[in-house]
Image (cartoon, helix red, strand yellow):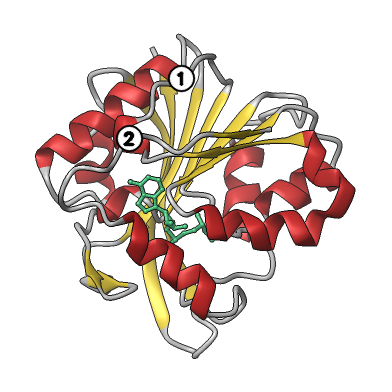
Amino acid sequence: MIEAAADTPEPGIDAKHWDRVYETIADDAVSWFEPEPRASLEALALADISVRASLVDVGAGSSRLVEQLLDRGATDLTVVDIASSAFETSRARLGSRALKVDWVVADVTQWCPDRRFDVWHDRALFHFLTEPWQRDGYRAALRSATAGGAWMIIATFADDGPDRCSGLPVQRYDGPSLTAEFASDFVAHDVWRDEHRSPGGVIQPFTWAVMRRR
Ligand SMILES: C[S@@+](CC[C@H](N)C(=O)[O-])C[C@H]1O[C@@H](n2cnc3c(N)ncnc32)[C@H](O)[C@@H]1O
């Protein structure tokens, strides 16, 4: 199922930018490309999360996470992204298996989820939210999409990581500053640093956190 796009985004969140990215750059050439979502799978294992858990990947882009989870037997997967063009690549790759995934084109800062998930996953979206109102919107969606006991897996550029990505400024986080963003609802379970090597060979330090909703 593909949901309709959200209302026109507020200034500062440029859906057209992201659509252009996926229309003009091969999905394995973007700086965040990884052939295998190693750290995401490690995070799921760290929290001993069952493959049967319902999972939403926000800012999923054309990530391979969904197909890797389908390979492992997942049955309740949702992806959210502001760029519909990102999903065209993923859906083409998945073929008929795309029908097993819910595809939501929305700006997560304005998204009103109509259900709850066991796991919220975000690799490299949250750091683009440089304005407090954007992060408030993100937290509102996160709160609606989860209940007590739900897991959140999030990765942003680390405090010594790049200060821009895809030509846009980013907010960088170390472990304490990242977990503080969600401390009103979520307790940190594991926090660590990981290094991503871009297709161009550039090392990008990330802060990863697994948190659990109170
Ligand atoms: C750096 S990419 C990461 C993609 C994917 N998570 C991965 O690891 O390959 C950031 C993604 O977030 C999406 N994005 C940016 N701002 C967004 C927003 N406000 N709401 C939903 N998606 C957004 C972009 O379209 C892009 O696909």
Q: Amino acid at mark 1?
A: Ala
Camera-side residue of 191 and 162: 162
Residue 201: x and y in percent read: 49, 89
- Residue drawn at the location 47% of the way across and 54% of the way down: 83
Q: Residue furthest bottom?
A: 200
Label 2: which residue? 7
Residue 213: x and y in percent read: 41, 18
In terms of image quadrants, where is residue 159?
bottom left
Instruction: Give the class, few, some or many, for how many residues have Cα within 10 Å of label 1's Cα (few <14, many ≥20).
Output: many
Helix, strand or loop at disc 2? Answer: loop
Helix, strand or loop at disc 1? Answer: helix
Residue 206: x and y in percent read: 38, 62
Q: Residue furthest left?
A: 132
Instruction: Give the class, few, some or many, for how many residues have Cα within 10 Å of label 2's Cα (few <14, many ≥20).
Output: few
Q: Is residue 8 left or right of residue 6?
A: left
In terms of image quadrants, where is residue 94?
bottom right
Q: Measured along the vertical axis of the image, is residue 101 above or below residue 85?
A: above
Residue 118: x and y in percent read: 58, 21
Camera-side residue of 39 and 115: 115
- Residue drawn at the location 80% of the way across and 29% of the way down: 75
Q: Is residue 132 left or right of residue 139?
A: left
Q: Judge whether residue 112 can be spotted in this image.
A: yes
Q: CA distance from mark 2 to mark 1?
A: 19 Å
Label 1: which residue? 145
The nearer-to-camera label among 2 and 1 is 2
- Whether ligand 1 has any atom under 8 Å from the Cβ at mark 1 is answered as no
Camera-side residue of 112 and 190: 112
Q: Earlier in the sequence, mark 2 or mark 1?
A: 2
Q: Amino acid at mark 2?
A: Asp
